Image: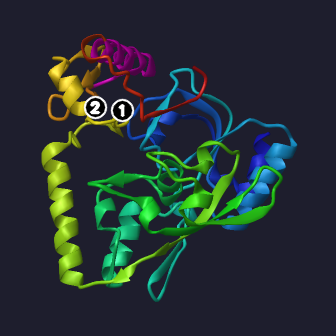
Amino acid sequence: MEDLLKKLVGSANVLVNEPMKNHTSFKIGGDADFLVQPQTKKTLCDTVTTLRQEGIPLTFIGNGSNLLVSDKGIRGVVVKICSKMGGIEVDGNKIIAQSGVSLTRLTQIAYSSGLTGLEFAAGIPGTIGGAIVMNAGAYDHEIKEVAASTTYLDENGEIHVLTGIREHKFGYRSSIFQEKDWVILESEFHLKPGESNKIWSQMESIIRKRKRKQPLEFPSAGSAFKRPKDGFASKLIDDAGLKGLRVGDAMVSDKHCGFIINAGNATADNVLELLKQVQDEVFAQFGIMLEPEIKMVGDF
């Protein structure tokens, strides 16, 4: 297996028995059997197609900013699509970016090009691929508002393009990519001309707000729960008296109750138990079952 992977992506891009805590913002997770980082779109397509033909289990990640990886790790091959797949091009009011481009870089490129529409994404961790999969959003805006098309590799090794909100099946923190065994290669964003000083001012304001309100000084996977209908998960958790609730080193943040943080050496089992306790207590008090926004991957 190792020799095959090195042949596909190059020896420098293959890691064996790799601790996944090194690849997630939670800093949690056991070892992956193998982790590979393709550097080009062709390499990514060839690697995925070959490994699928061999029947090897594949797990796809970006920057790991929304993941909880099992303490037992991940069997098979983890395909990490990040900065090594970071091609980006500006064409008028359009930005075409490979799936490994970070949202931070995308927003900076938009700003430097005098393009508005992505300010809401300033400070959101993760990659474009992850943002499309989750329809990432903040402050009443979502990626679906600017994502015009997405090029992907299907389960048969063929490349296709989706266009528009309907074909992407964008919903609240969801898209068609959560239903299919497809791999995002790149996306095209349609923006509008704007004044650079206003774009920068809005981005700065949003980043300051994040730093002020969110526990960015601790490892986490962002918002732990999706927003329930007619309310906010963080308020329900706070009203239930769960601020600071702890299982091992997994803790409900006392700065923002919507976040579960790794306060030291939390395990995935700690986080799972804390998620369950929060869900049970909020349901007991308010009759609302919170749905996790964190994606669980690996050998649970």
Q: In the rendered image, is residue 280 in sight? A: yes
What amino acid is found at the position of numbered circle 2 in the picture? Ala
- Quadrant position of residue 247: top left
Q: Quadrant of the C terminus?
A: top right
Q: Which residue is mark 1?
A: 225
Which callout, 1 or 2, points at the residue further toward the start of the chain? 1
| Bounds of the magenta segment | 264-283
Q: Position of residue 226 (x, y in %)?
A: 37, 36
Q: Residue at coordinates 23% horizontally, 76% vertically from top-left? A: 199
Q: Secondary structure at mark 1?
A: loop
Q: Is residue 267 magenta?
A: yes
Q: Is residue 179 left or right of residue 277?
A: right
Q: Amino acid at mark 1?
A: Phe
Do the residues bearing badges 1 and 2 touch, measured as CB atoms within 8 Å?
A: yes
- 287, 103: nearer the viewer: 287
Which is more toward the observer, 48 or 206? 206
- Residue at disc 2, secondary structure: helix
Q: In which quarter of the view is residue 66 placed? A: top left
The CA distance from mark 1 to mark 2 is: 6 Å
The residue furthest right is 53
Q: Nearer the viewer, residue 36 or 52?
A: 52
Q: Is residue 211 above or below residue 198?
A: above
Instruction: Indicate which disc residue 233 carries.
Output: 2
Q: Is residue 297 left or right of residue 207?
A: right
| Whether residue 231 is situated above or below residue 281 in the rendered picture | below
Is 229 situated left or right of 161 in this image? left
Main secondary structure type of the part rendered in magenta: helix
